[in-house]
Image (spheres, rainbow, N blue to C red):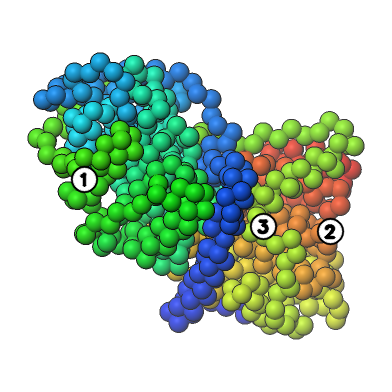
Amino acid sequence: MTPTLLLALLIPAADPTPEQRAKADTAIHKYLAAQTERLSKTPFDGATTKAEWEKKRPELKQQFLDMMGLWPLPDKTPLKAIVTGELERSNVVIENVHFQSKPGLYVTGNLYRPKVNDKKLPAILYVCGHSGRGRDGNKVAFQDHGLWFASNGYVCLVVDTLQLGEVAGKHHGTYNLDRFWWQTRGYTPAGVECWNGIRAIDYLISRPDVDADKIGVTGISGGGATTVWMAAADDRVKVAVPVSGMSDLESYVSNKVINGHCDCMFYVNTYQWEWTTALALFAPKPLLFANSDNDPIFPMDGNRRIIARLRKLYEMVGSKDNVDEYVSVGGHDYRPDLRIAIFGFFNQHLKGDKTPVKDADFAKIEGKELRVFPEDKDMPKDSINATMDETFVTKADVKIPEKKEEFAAWKAGLVKQLREKSFRALPEKVLAAKGKFPEAPGVTTLATEGDLAAFAATLEVSLPGKITTLVVINVDEDPIRASARVRSLFLEDNFRVLGLAPRGSFDQRWTRKNPPNTVERSLALLGQTVDSGRVLDILAVLSAEPSITRIVATDRAAGLAIYAALFSAGQVKELILDNSPTSHRDGPHFLNIDRVLDLPTAMGLLAPDVKLTLVNSKDKAFDRTEAIYKLAGGKFERK
């Protein structure tokens, strides 16, 4: 039997049956739920006393900013704020204003202020949710809040979001645009919204009519999420009221509520936090956690868990009276009682006024009047809003050492960063895969992590003996093509090869719908990716078969093999990669990895202990790999 025919018989059908698909779905969602349960056991990074929390909080805040793509904080460049129009309604003046939170990143908003005023006033930053108002921007949907605050002695700035603002960008990268390189970059539009909010506060406190010591922030839905981000990130926020803007991991992942949300609702959970920890960073300042009792995308069971954790933390830090909740009866929307609760909370904590308030009741202003750029011809020509995902988070620029004696420390530093930023969920020692490896032609299903499975197949059998070579097969790769390509990489006649098809392959393929890409997006909320799990699969096989010292991989699987070899504790001595990708842009995807190094540099970290052969590798990107190998004195070959 020829190797090609052998492999074609060994590998299961590419399209799983409905029963197989259901089984695979059960396995992956059981895994996600188990990981969620594990992370949910340690809110506040395990702090149980005030002293522990105060000691941890500075580092946690830095971690939070890092997970938003905001560490180190970007430079605060000139805002270049411009008021393009002004109108009056009764006792309120509305300024249509824009500023640039970064050069070319335009933020459009409406600033509401009392018509008559001679003193500094408390200010509210109102951050919008997802309300599609087209060319007018979503800020016009929340004008009643701006009018109420200005009528009641506040300055209120209502700002557009990136997705639905006048100058639009994208929130839906991994939701339906297949931009999973956002995970690779460590980019989330939540970071943009947070940064825009930080700069909006910069604008507010630059005004002579704003009291910089009395800043509040609020918003509903996506605006509720941004309120959480602002409360955690900016110490100038003194009072926060997130409205229907945050649930917890159990809701998002275990109960699949993530399907109802776009990417701006989530930070990249690099440090594997229990989700409430982000909002806990606001303690001990006044916080009203406001929700509705029949909101399918912010369900009450999640709300109850969050407020219970927050009450525990606020009591722990000695400020239990500063946190409260309000639950309105109804769905995902504002109602009079909800608005009154919000307005009253700000009055109490920013103005010291506990007098009952009335609901907002104002005549509607036409959206066109609230445009910052009245006509299409007025839109800024230098805007980078639409391509913000390409530039907001900076890729690493790793310098190669000049001297060989510097190489070991340089390598150790990068590997440490990889462990911290991209492979935090990967155990230091991966447990051996469970299952019997085939000693004759055949296929074995291996358990590599809980109920998750990978396939092992004997690709070639010559003389009896130990397996020395592992071939990583690409997910969805045609098995006949795989066999032919693997065979072409070897010159010797006698060898024994184990083929590995990692998780998500063949009849282990779970359901994937775009949108909402449930599994792939849920994993990022748990500090993982599908591909980091596949690296674990390879390491589990290596742990089970210590005789394997060589890995062969092609195309995207080559990227998996690189990191498996790097984390193999010296077991892998040779790597043969055919048609390897030159970057992580199209995969494999690992959280934040572009912020640590590029793929050719990662290859170079295998030196000097791993012999590296690159086939079909004429791309100049690999010149960098070759230079690193030359520096370290490793064996390197290009074909």
Q: Nearer the viewer, residue 386 or 337?
A: 337
Is residue 256 placed above or below 102 in the rendered structure?
below
Residue pictured at 72% horizontal, 82% vertical? 436
Is residue 337 placed above or below 448 in the rendered structure?
above
Image coords of residue 270 (percent x, y): 58, 51
Which residue bears the numbered disc 1?
340
Residue pictured at 35% horizontal, 18% vertical? 207
| Tag nearer the camera, 3 or 2 | 2
Asked whether residue 346 appears in the rendered view, the answer is no
Label 3: few (<14), some (14–19) or many (≥20) C-alpha neighbours in 10 Å: many
State the mark number for residue 560.
3
Cα distance between the residues tagged 3 and 2: 16 Å
- Classify residue 333 as left or right of residue 208: left
Identify the element where label 1 is drawn.
Answer: helix
What type is the residue that disc 2 sits on?
Gly
| Tag nearer the camera, 3 or 1 | 1
Which residue bears the numbered disc 2?
570
